[in-house]
Image (spheres, rainbow, N blue to C red):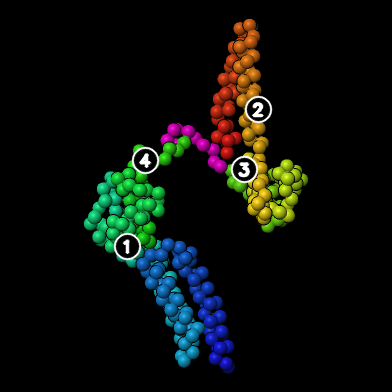
Amino acid sequence: MPLWLEVVIRTLVSVVVLFFLTRMLGKRQVSQLSLFEYITGITIGSITAYISLDVDTDWYLGIVALVVWVLVSYGIEVLQLKSKRSRNWIEGKSTVLIKDGKILEDNLKKEKLTNEELLEQLRQKNVFKAAEVEFATIEPSGEVNILLKSEYQPITPAHLGIKVAPEPESQAVILDGRVMDEPLSNLGLNRDWLDTELEKLGVSIDNVFLGQVDGYGQLFVDLYDDQLQVPEPQEKASLLAQLKKCEADLEMYALSTEDTEAKQMYTDCSNQLMQVIHDVKPLLSQ
C-alpha cells in the first residue's frame, strides 16, 4: 500500500472513531472547558495526530490508547455527577474576587489573576468601575460572573412592579428565497397572507434572504440586495394613531356636550381608552 494512501486511511479512521467517542463524552467537551477537560482535549488531539501520521508503528495501538483515555474521561464525568467532593477536587470551586465593591487581593493571587486581567473581565461585562460590583466570582471554567449593586442595575418591569406578558416566539417563514410552510401554519397563516405582505413591502420572494414573522403578525424581511431599503411595517403605528384619535374624539365630545350624563360617559370612556393606550403602547411602539 502506498504511504500516502495509508496516511489517508488512518486519518479517516481516526476522525470517525474520535467523532463517536466525543459524542459519548457529551456537549461539555465543546463548551467552557474545566482544567481536566482542557487536558483531555489536548491529549486526544495528540493521540489522533499520532494515529494519522506515525506510520512506523501499529495504528491500532493509537486507537486503543484513544479508547482508554476517553473511557477514563467518561468515568471521571460519571464520578463528578455522583460525588460533590470529587467534583470539587477535579474541577475546583468558584472563588470570590469582589465583595461589596472591594477587591479581594488574596483571592486574586490564589487564582493567578492580575488586577489588569480582572478589570478586563469586568469590561467584557460592560462594567468599568469595580466599586459598582456587589459580588464577582471566577468559575472553574475561568469565566468571571458579576452581580452589580442594586443602584447600578438597569431598571426592569419587575423593579416597577409591572407584570409583562411573555414575548411570543418569532418564526422564520422565508429562508433563501423559499417559503417555509410549517412555521407559517404554526402562526395560523398561509401563503396568500405572505404574498399580500410582500406586495405591501414591494419586494419579490426571490429577493428575500430571510423573512421572519413575530408573535404579533408583523413580517420583517432581509433582502439579498443590501442596497434596497425595505420600509418598516406600519400596522402597529397606524393602530396606535387610531387609538389616540379615538381618545381625543371622546375627550372633545365630553367638552362640547352640555348634558351632564353624556359628559360623564364620554369622560369615563376617554379615561378607559387612555389606560388601554398606556398598556399597549410598549407593544405598538416596537
Circle 1 residue: 92
Q: SS for tag 3? A: loop
Residue position marked by numbered label 2 in the rendering: 242
Q: Which residue is mark 4?
A: 152
Residue 71 percent location from the top left of the image: 43, 74
Magenta segment includes 160: yes
User: Foreground: 38 or 204?
Assistant: 204
Q: Check if mark 2's residue and mark 1's residue have beta carbons within 8 Å.
A: no
**C-alpha gap between disc 1 and disc 4:** 31 Å
Along the polypeptide, which appears first: circle 2 or circle 1?
1
Characterize the local packing of mark 3: few (<14), some (14-19) or many (20 or more) Cα atoms within 10 angstroms.
few
Range drawn in magenta: 158-167
Kind of residue sitting beneath label 1: Gly
Percent position (x, y) of residue 86?
33, 65
Any part of residue 95 in sight: no
Residue contact at pointers 1 and 4, CB within 8 angstroms? no
Marks 1 and 4: which is nearer the front?
A: 4
Q: Which mark is residue 215?
A: 3
Q: CA distance from mark 4 to mark 2?
A: 38 Å
Amino acid type, mark 4: Tyr
Helix, strand or loop for disc 1: loop
Q: Cα distance, mark 1 to mark 3? A: 44 Å
Q: Nearer the viewer, mark 4 or mark 3?
A: 4
Expressed as whole percent of the image width and height from the top left, the position of residue 280 reads 57, 32
Indicate the secondary structure of the residue bearing disc 2: helix
Contact between marks 4 and 3 (CB within 8 A): the answer is no
Q: Nearer the viewer, residue 245 or 67?
A: 245
Taking the image as shown, residue 40 lies to the left or right of residue 267, namely left
